């Protein structure tokens, strides 16, 4: 994958992976991959998957957060507070409800466009990895209530021996969506009648 610049950031996905794999002494090498990296690396889902196979990757875990509105709210609150994780002994950050923009400056439905784009991305990922060894993990089903569930699934998937994991962090946003999103009624109006309407609790 060729290096590319986006917002002043340059990254080479293959080069970064190769460097990290060379310095790793672990039996298994894995990494977390976000859709943003594709744009930064100027590549697409299929090309990236092919490069991973060439590099020797054999197992793929696809983690999804089904409720994208909750995901947007959490990401916005974390960006505003600067707190991305919290231990039980930490003081909970004082953060109020967040605004989720629904339209662009020209009135275009940016929220719906974003939600649709995320859904298309994951459909592409599933198609591209259809013949690979894949484990599907959903945040709401396998992590939100007890992250040890997802941990056990991954350990089984890799054929490793089960251990009891430590869970040092806890959820930051536990309030209902109506209390987390300041412009809840506006978001509800935009999502009404769409496939995303269920995300508003």
Image (tube, rainbow, N blue to C red):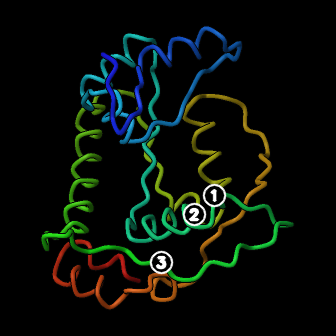
Q: Residue at x 60, y 8 (%)?
A: 22
Query: Taking 141 as reference, is 41 left or right?
Result: left
User: 48 or 133, which is in the foreground?
Assistant: 48
Where's the C terminus, which quadrant? bottom left
In space, the residues marked 2 and 3 are separated at their CA atoms by 10 Å
Query: Taking 134 as reference, is 1 left or right?
Result: left
Q: Residue at x 62, y 20 (%)?
A: 28
**x then y, percent, for residue 31:** 54, 30
Counting other residues with Cα less than 10 Å from the Cα at mark 3, is it few (<14), some (14-19), or many (20 or more)? some
Counting other residues with Cα less than 10 Å from the Cα at mark 2, is it few (<14), some (14-19), or many (20 or more)? some
**x then y, percent, for residue 34:** 42, 41
Q: Secondary structure at mark 3?
A: loop
**x then y, percent, for residue 170:** 71, 64
Q: Are marks 1 and 2 in contact (CB under 8 Å)?
A: yes
In primary-sequence order, the first of circles 2 and 3 is 2
Q: Which residue is mark 2?
A: 78
Q: Are marks 2 and 3 in contact (CB under 8 Å)?
A: no
User: 94 or 156, which is in the foreground?
Assistant: 94
In primary-sequence order, the first of circles 1 and 2 is 2
Q: Of the numbered discs in the image, which one, if any, rests on residue 98?
A: 3
Query: Taking 107 as reference, is 38 left or right?
Result: right
Q: Are marks 3 and 1 in contact (CB under 8 Å)?
A: no
User: 133 or 114, which is in the foreground?
Assistant: 114
Q: Which residue is mark 1?
A: 84
182 is higher (above) or lower (below) than 130: below
Q: Residue at x 37, y 16 (%)?
A: 53
Q: Quadrant of residue 112?
A: bottom left
In space, the residues marked 3 and 1 are separated at their CA atoms by 15 Å
């Amino acid at each position: 994958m060729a290096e590319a610049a986006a917002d002043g950031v340059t990254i080479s996905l293959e080069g970064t992976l190769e460097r990290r794999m060379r310095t790793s002494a672990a039996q298994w090498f894995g990494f977390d991959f976000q859709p943003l990296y594709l744009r930064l690396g100027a590549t697409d889902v299929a090309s990236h998957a092919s490069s991973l196979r060439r590099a020797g990757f054999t197992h793929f875990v696809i983690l999804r957060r089904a409720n994208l509105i909750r995901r947007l709210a959490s990401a916005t609150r974390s960006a505003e507070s600067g707190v991305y994780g919290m231990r039980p002994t930490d003081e909970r950050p004082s953060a109020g409800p967040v605004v989720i923009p629904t339209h662009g400056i020209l009135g275009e439905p940016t929220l719906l466009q974003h939600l649709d784009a995320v859904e298309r991305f994951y459909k592409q990922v599933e198609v591209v990895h259809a013949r690979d060894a894949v484990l599907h993990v959903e945040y709401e089903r396998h992590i939100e209530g007890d992250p040890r569930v997802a941990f056990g699934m991954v350990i089984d998937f890799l054929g490793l021996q089960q251990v009891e994991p430590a869970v040092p962090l806890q959820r930051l946003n536990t309030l209902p969506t109506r209390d987390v999103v300041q412009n809840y009624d506006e978001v509800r109006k935009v999502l009404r009648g769409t496939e995303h309407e269920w995300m508003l609790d």
